[in-house]
Image (cartoon, rainbow, N blue to C red):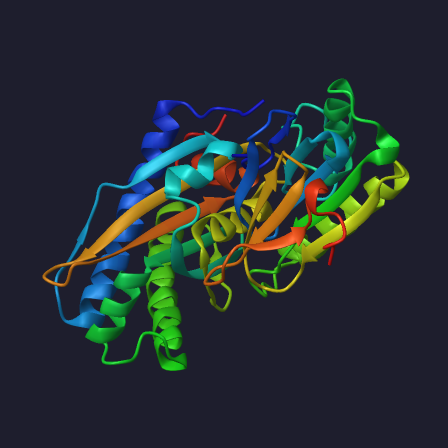
Amino acid sequence: MPESYPDLHLDALRELANIGSGTAATALSRMLGRPVDISVPTALALPMADAVEAVGAPDTLITAVVLPLVGDLDAIALLMFGAPDAATLCGLLGVEADSEMGISALAEIGNILGCAYIGALSTMTQLALEPCPPETATDMLGAIVASVLATTAEDTDTALLLDSELTVEGAECALSFMLAPGRDGVAEILARLGLGE
Amino acid sequence: MVRMGELAVSRTSGHVLASIGLGSCIGLVLVERSRSLAGLAHIVLPESAGKDDVAAGKFADSAVPALLAELSSLGARRSRLEAVLVGGAQMFALKSSTSMDIGKRNEQAARAALEQLGVTVSAAATGGNLGRTVRVYVDGGRVTVKQPGAPEEELFAGAAQVGSLR
């Protein structure tokens, strides 16, 4: 049976995502020289079968940057760009979207945002977290999200997703940022926030 | 739609079973073509390690017998069933130990479970680093695969087209 998280815990995780994505937005804004807005993040605890569609239509083509985290907990940070958003971002950086340079620029954006997000998380929870080198893939949303969830799904049928959206002002360009911690990871984060059992 | 960890069977004419966006997951298809019976499981991980309170299609070692049982209850004969495997890609070359090529391990576990039950794998589109969508047309048991940027292609011919098997 999927387990559930009490609202208080989801609120705490959402707040964590809020601070993490705020830091990431600042980093992106500095990189592009434009203001970046963040949406109120969502924290979702879902049965695994529902998780992919909660993120988006499974057959949408996206470019994703995956940052595995190691250290005090296992988690995967995932940045997702829709194809038009990836092209706009690359344009803002002055590189071709469908080139090696474009992919590498997106990986770098992923890396910088991921590190900013994780740094904030680390500071708040006093957990030592280290990102591994980023990997990029352009594929169906379903294939990417499911493959990420599979790595954290060993012990639980519940997928926990922290999802934030960043929007670059005046450029019609958005990307979403997702953190998928393993179950032990969630327990550890909550304990550090004083919400352990 | 058969989503992560789910399985479905059908003998309803006109039905299509589909898993959209299989990455490291495996779409395990079992069909009895001559009688238009079909089943699809969306396998996420190789081994259940004895866990039994999980989604029926989640682990290869428990999904294979579960799908077989559902098909048998629709009247399928095990000796006539054919298996098709789709998915098991390595989407990311991640170095962390937990994600050590889940796709390949899923395929191995699914093949082992099928062999144990004496079911032949008749076709497979597995591995690589691109996602796949699998569709199973219940009428005749035709199976198609679609990868991003490519058209839907037939992987396994339906009963009405026996002889065009690739």
Residue at 85% over, 40% down: B119
Residue B109 location, x and y as percent? 78, 46
Residue at 87% over, 43% down: B115
Q: Is residue B52 above or below residue A27?
A: above
Left of A117 or right of it: where is B62?
Answer: right
Residue at 37% over, 72% down: A108
Left of B165 or right of it: where is A51?
Answer: left
Left of A106 or right of it: where is B19?
Answer: right
Kindly indicate the quadrant of the structure image that contains residue B33: top right
Residue A34 location, x and y as percent? 13, 67
Residue B3 location, x and y as percent? 54, 36
Kindly indicate the quadrant of the structure image that contains residue B54: top right
Position of the N terminus of chain A by quadrant: top right
Along the line of sight, which residue is nearer the eye, A68 or A120? A68
Residue A4 location, x and y as percent? 47, 24
Residue at 55% over, 41% down: B19
Left of B104 or right of it: where is B91?
Answer: left
